[in-house]
Image: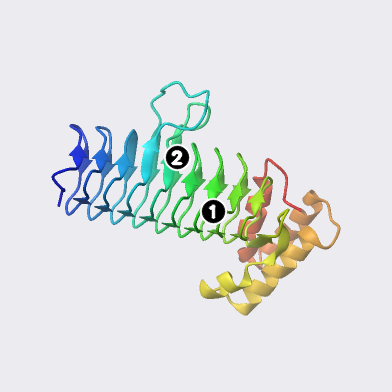
């Protein structure tokens, strides 16, 4: 299962049924769980832990030093969950001591070619990053988020769960849960209703989320006023809670 040209450095820990392709390099602090497939010419280094069932394609670079001039070799890490697909030329850098020191990727994510996840990013589960999507440092991404091709997020942005960023949409402010963003410059364009249907949300739940969107973006309310009204509704409409929580976590202000 290990190609004879691959280099597995002493100290690396590989689980059962792990396959490593030609000319790949696995560093001494790397842990790879069962049933992972590592293609040819992959570099996995640093203190990196990869969960079971992941597939990492050729020329990906996982766990390398962050692209941060302040980084001075501190002992930081990358943690990747289970059943992720990481395609060609994807780069995922380890964290920095200026933050929590760990870059994280959850479970069942799909990262297409040339995507970049920078230092200290916290990415949830079931996300899709189309070709060339990019996260700057310290970005938080919720579950089920979709990044279209060449979209991305400025450092410290928060992207709420079930959000959708359209092609070439680079955001520099926070995107609440469920919201679709597109255009240049990118702007909110409503709710990701098609994605919600596919994930089992009912028509009533989607209607409630749309009403929540109108409170935030169409009613002329201040942010605190909109959140207060959403909270009044959330007891009977719990699907609004991800939207509320993503707004309350906002540090860079909401994209408008």
Give coordinates of residue 41: x percent, y percent: 28, 45
Specify which label sits upstream in the sequence, 1 or 2.
2
Please say if 56 is above or below 199: above
Q: Tell me the quarter of the picture where residue 166 sits.
A: bottom right
Seen from the viewer's position, the closer of residues 94 and 3 is 3
Instruction: Report the side of 82 relative to 179 (left or right).
Output: left
Residue 89 marker: none
| Residue 27 or residue 168, whichever sits in front | 168
Who's the residue at 65% across and 77% down the image? 204
Q: Does 80 appear above or below 198? A: above
User: Which numbered disc covers residue 103?
Assistant: 2
**Which residue is pictured at 49% across the width and 32% down the height?**
67
Query: Looking at the image, do the residues carrying marks 1 and 2 touch, with CB atoms under 8 Å apart?
Result: no
Residue that appears at 37% across and 42% down: 61
Q: Nearer the viewer, mark 1 or mark 2?
A: 2
Q: CA distance from mark 1 to mark 2?
A: 14 Å
Q: Residues within 10 Å of mark 1 (few under 14, many from 20)?
A: many
Question: Left or right of 228: which side holds 55?
Answer: left
| Nearer the observer, 205 or 171 | 171
Q: Image point 31% across, 41% down: which residue?
A: 43
Secondary element at tag 1: loop
Q: Would you name the residue on which mark 1 appears?
A: 142
Under tag 2, what secondary structure?
Answer: strand
Q: Is 176 displayed left or right of 104 in the figure?
A: right
Residue 233 placement (x, y as % from top left): 71, 64
Toward the viewer: 146 or 230?
A: 146
Say if 66 sits above or below 256 in the image. above
Where in the figure is residue 240, as x and y percent of width and height? Answer: 65, 62
Residue 88 percent coordinates (x, y): 38, 52
Q: Is the residue marked by circle 2 packed among few (<14), some (14-19), or many (20+) residues within 10 Å?
A: many
Quarter of the image for residue 37 reads bottom left
């Amino acid at each position: 299962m290990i190609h004879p040209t691959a280099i597995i450095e002493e100290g690396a820990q590989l689980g059962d049924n792990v396959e490593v392709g030609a000319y790949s390099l696995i560093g001494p602090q790397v842990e790879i769980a069962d049933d992972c497939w590592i293609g040819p010419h992959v570099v996995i280094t640093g203190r990196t832990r990869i969960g079971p069932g992941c597939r990492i394609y050729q020329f990906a670079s996982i766990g390398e030093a962050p692209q941060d001039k302040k980084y001075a070799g501190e002992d930081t890490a990358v943690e990747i969950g289970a059943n992720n697909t990481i395609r060609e030329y994807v780069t995922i850098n380890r964290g920095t001591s200026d933050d929590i020191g760990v870059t994280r990727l959850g479970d069942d994510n799909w990262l297409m070619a040339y995507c970049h996840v920078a230092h200290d990013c916290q990415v949830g589960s079931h996300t899709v990053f189309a070709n060339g999507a990019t996260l700057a440092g310290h970005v938080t991404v919720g579950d089920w988020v979709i990044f279209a091709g060449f979209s991305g997020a400025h450092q410290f942005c928060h992207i709420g769960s079930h959000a959708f960023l359209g092609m070439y949409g680079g955001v520099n402010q926070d995107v609440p849960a469920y919201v679709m963003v597109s255009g240049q410059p990118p702007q909110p364009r409503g709710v990701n209703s098609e994605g919600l249907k596919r994930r089992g949300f009912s028509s009533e739940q989607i209607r409630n989320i749309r009403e929540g969107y109108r409170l935030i973006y169409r009613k002329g309310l201040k942010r605190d006023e909109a959140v207060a009204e959403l909270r009044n509704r959330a007891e009977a409409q719990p699907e609004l809670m991800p939207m509320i929580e993503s707004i309350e976590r906002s540090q860079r202000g909401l994209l408008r």
